[in-house]
Amino acid sequence: MLTQAVQLAKKTIPRRHRWLLRARRRHGSWFLRTPDRRLLEGKIIPYFAGLRGVRRVLDIGCDWYTAGYPRLFPTQQYCSIDIDPEKAHFARGEHRVASLLELDQHMEAASVDLVIANGVFGWGVDGRADISLAMRQIERVLRADGCVVVGWNDTDERRPDPLAEILEAPGFAPFAIPNIKAASVVTDTAYRHTYHFFKKIG
Ligand SMILES: C[S@@+](CC[C@H](N)C(=O)[O-])C[C@H]1O[C@@H](n2cnc3c(N)ncnc32)[C@H](O)[C@@H]1O
C-alpha cells in the first residue's frame, strides 16, 4: 500500500519537488529519510557528540540534508568545508569554500576533535594520490586521539578507488564505537552505504 502510494506520488509530484519523498523535517531542518542517514544521525553522531573531549567538529561536504547537522552537536563548535561555492548556502556557522586537499591553507593543525567525511571519497575525491592526500590533511587537522568517520557507497560507480588508501592510511587505527560495537558498518541500503571509524594515532 505504502509502496503504491510512493509510486503514485512519484508520477504526480513534479520532478523538482520529488526530493520531499526522501525527506523528513525535524527542528526546522530537512533530513534524509534513509537507513544510512538514520544510523549516522541517530547513533554515530550522538555517540561522538556525547564525548566530553569532542569540542570542535569539521564536516566535509554539505547539502540541503546536512543543514541541520550543527544542531546534532549542541555543545560543540561545528564547522564545514565544501569545494563547491553553490553549496555554501546550506552551511550553517563557520564554513569554508575550499578543497579538502588544501585544508592546511584554511585550518590550523590539531584544531579539530572529529572529522566527518561522508560521501566525499567517490564523490569528488578519487584516485590514489588525492585520497592519500585527503587522509593526510584529515590527520593533520585532528588533535591527538581525534576521530574520523568516513562514509562511502560500496557500489562499482562510487566505491573509493583504491580503498586501501583509506583503510590502511598511516596515522590511523580502526576504532570500534561502543553503540555499534564495530569499527565499520554496512547499512541496509541498495547502495551499501558503509561507515568506517578511525582514531588518529601516534
Ligand atoms: C555527495 S555530497 C556529500 C555531502 C555530505 N558530506 C553528506 O553527508 O552527504 C559530496 C560533497 O563533497 C563536496 N566535495 C567534493 N570534492 C571535494 C573536495 N575536494 N573538497 C571539499 N568538498 C568536496 C561536493 O562539492 C559535495 O558537496
Image (cartoon, rainbow, N blue to C red):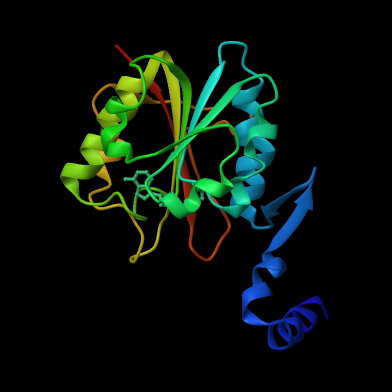
* Position of residue 78 measured from the top left corner of the image (x, y, whole percent): 57, 27
Q: How many marks?
A: 0
Q: Is residue 51 above or below residue 176?
A: above
Q: Is residue 59 above or below residue 151?
A: above
* Position of residue 195 measured from the top left corner of the image (x, y, whole percent): 48, 43
The quadrant the C terminus occupies is top left
The residue depicted at 74 percent of the width and 78 percent of the height is: 6
Quarter-of-image position of residue 101: top left
The residue depicted at 54 percent of the width and 52 percent of the height is: 63
Q: Choose between 164 and 46: the one closer to the eye.
A: 46
Say left or right for 83 vs 67: left
Q: Choose between 95 and 136: the one closer to the eye.
A: 95
In the image, farthest residue toward the right: 1
In the image, farthest residue toward the left: 129
* Position of residue 10 measured from the top left corner of the image (x, y, whole percent): 69, 82
Say left or right for 132 vs 4: left
The residue depicted at 25 percent of the width and 42 percent of the height is: 131
Say left or right for 28 vs 190: right
